[in-house]
Image (cartoon, helix red, strand yellow):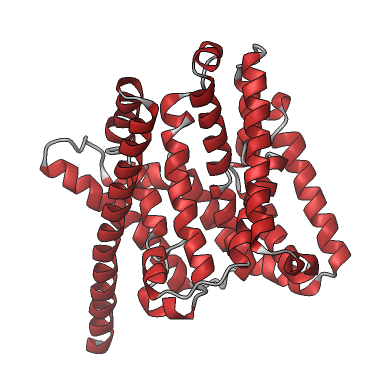
Amino acid sequence: MMGREIVKKNQRDSNMELLRIVAMILIMVLHADFASLSVPTIEQCYDSLFVSFSRFFIEGLAVVAVNAFVLLSGWYGIKASFQKISVFVFQTLFIIFFVYFCFLCIGKGGSHSIGEWLKIVFFNQYWFVQSYIILYAFSPILNAFVEKANKRTLEWVLVSLFVIQLLWGYLPYSANYGWYNDGYSPIAFFFLYLLARYIRLYVESVNMRNAKFYLLGWFFLSFIIALLAFVSVCSGYAGTHMLYLYGYSSPLVVMGALMLLLFFSRISVRSSVVNKIAASAYAVYIVHCHECIFNPIYITSVRNWFVGNPFCLFLMKTFLFLLLLFVLSVVIDRIRMIAWFLLLKFLKCLKCLR
């Protein structure tokens, strides 16, 4: 999910860069469904069967996106360096403060200090940032392990991580305990990272299937999740237990993310435009989850459109809104790239003066 500079994009596979874009759009869709509108109630399921089931299905399609980002890191392997993690941290903080100061200029920015913002980013709200930084820090160790371990050892580690996540972070009786919780943890990221490395290195059968097989697999798994969730709600089990079907550590969600990853790995795309846009995919996450945007604008707008419009019109308005926010985020990230270039130039000048 980490942004990559334009100068390196020509070396990237456009098909997998396209996955970054699609996955980020799916994350925005995810936040526009259950996160904004809550889970359909039993009354809504009976009164508006098509709309309710469509929302369950859309949530199933979109929930795989976060895992897909981490799998993509494991697919290629993170090549850790101080410069790369510096770009990631700078990108995060620049966009956070840029959006904040923009809202301050119109009198709606709140009153957070710099220290409070740093706490929000690195310890509170942006859980993905925290887990990814920990994954990044451990990536040299994970890479060395994959390089030295044989196939069977890697399989045992994957099974162990899966069982740990299942028993202590997924099943209903265990999902309230710390960073094991439902895939929101570095442990889940370690598992996904190693899983992608294992598949690319050892599972040769993935190359025997065409792209359509994996695309249909993603749709099929999303349909199964939606069907189980819909039946659960209609049967009166609309509590928090139903949401485990959509947990990041759910086996169905992990499999769906793999299907999405493998689909894009099997298609051929060559586009410098895709590569440049994908460099700013991570910025879209930071912008639309910003506290000045997410609750007061994002969630509020989606809720109002859902309540006040026919479903088709709601979908159209929401899609255009997400597209506009995506473009705005890319523009902001272009400014960030210029700022990073100027900062490097300034530091280089200081070094020369010494």
* Snapshot quadrant of residue 243: top right
Is residue 48 in view from this perspective?
yes
Q: Between residue 312 and residue 155, name the one nearer to us.
A: 312
Expressed as whole percent of the image width and height from the top left, the position of residue 30 reads 48, 39
Expressed as whole percent of the image width and height from the top left, the position of residue 137 reads 57, 62
Relative to residue 301, is residue 42 drawn left or right? Answer: right
Figure check: 84 above or below 65? below
Farthest residue in the right direction? 152
Expressed as whole percent of the image width and height from the top left, the position of residue 334 reads 27, 65
Split into 4 quadrants, where in the image is the C terminus?
bottom left
Relative to residue 213, is residue 29 drawn left or right? Answer: left
Q: Between residue 69 and residue 227, name the one nearer to us.
A: 227
Residue at left offset 58%, top offset 38%: 60
Residue at left offset 54%, top offset 20%: 49
Figure check: 47 above or below 81? above
Count of residue discs = 0
Figure check: 299 above or below 159? above
Relative to residue 200, is residue 352 drawn left or right? Answer: left
Farthest residue in the left direction? 106
Expressed as whole percent of the image width and height from the top left, the position of residue 151 reads 85, 67
Is residue 190 in view from this perspective?
no
Residue at left offset 72%, top offset 58%: 195
Q: Between residue 228 and residue 251, name the one nearer to us.
A: 228
* Snapshot quadrant of residue 138: bottom right
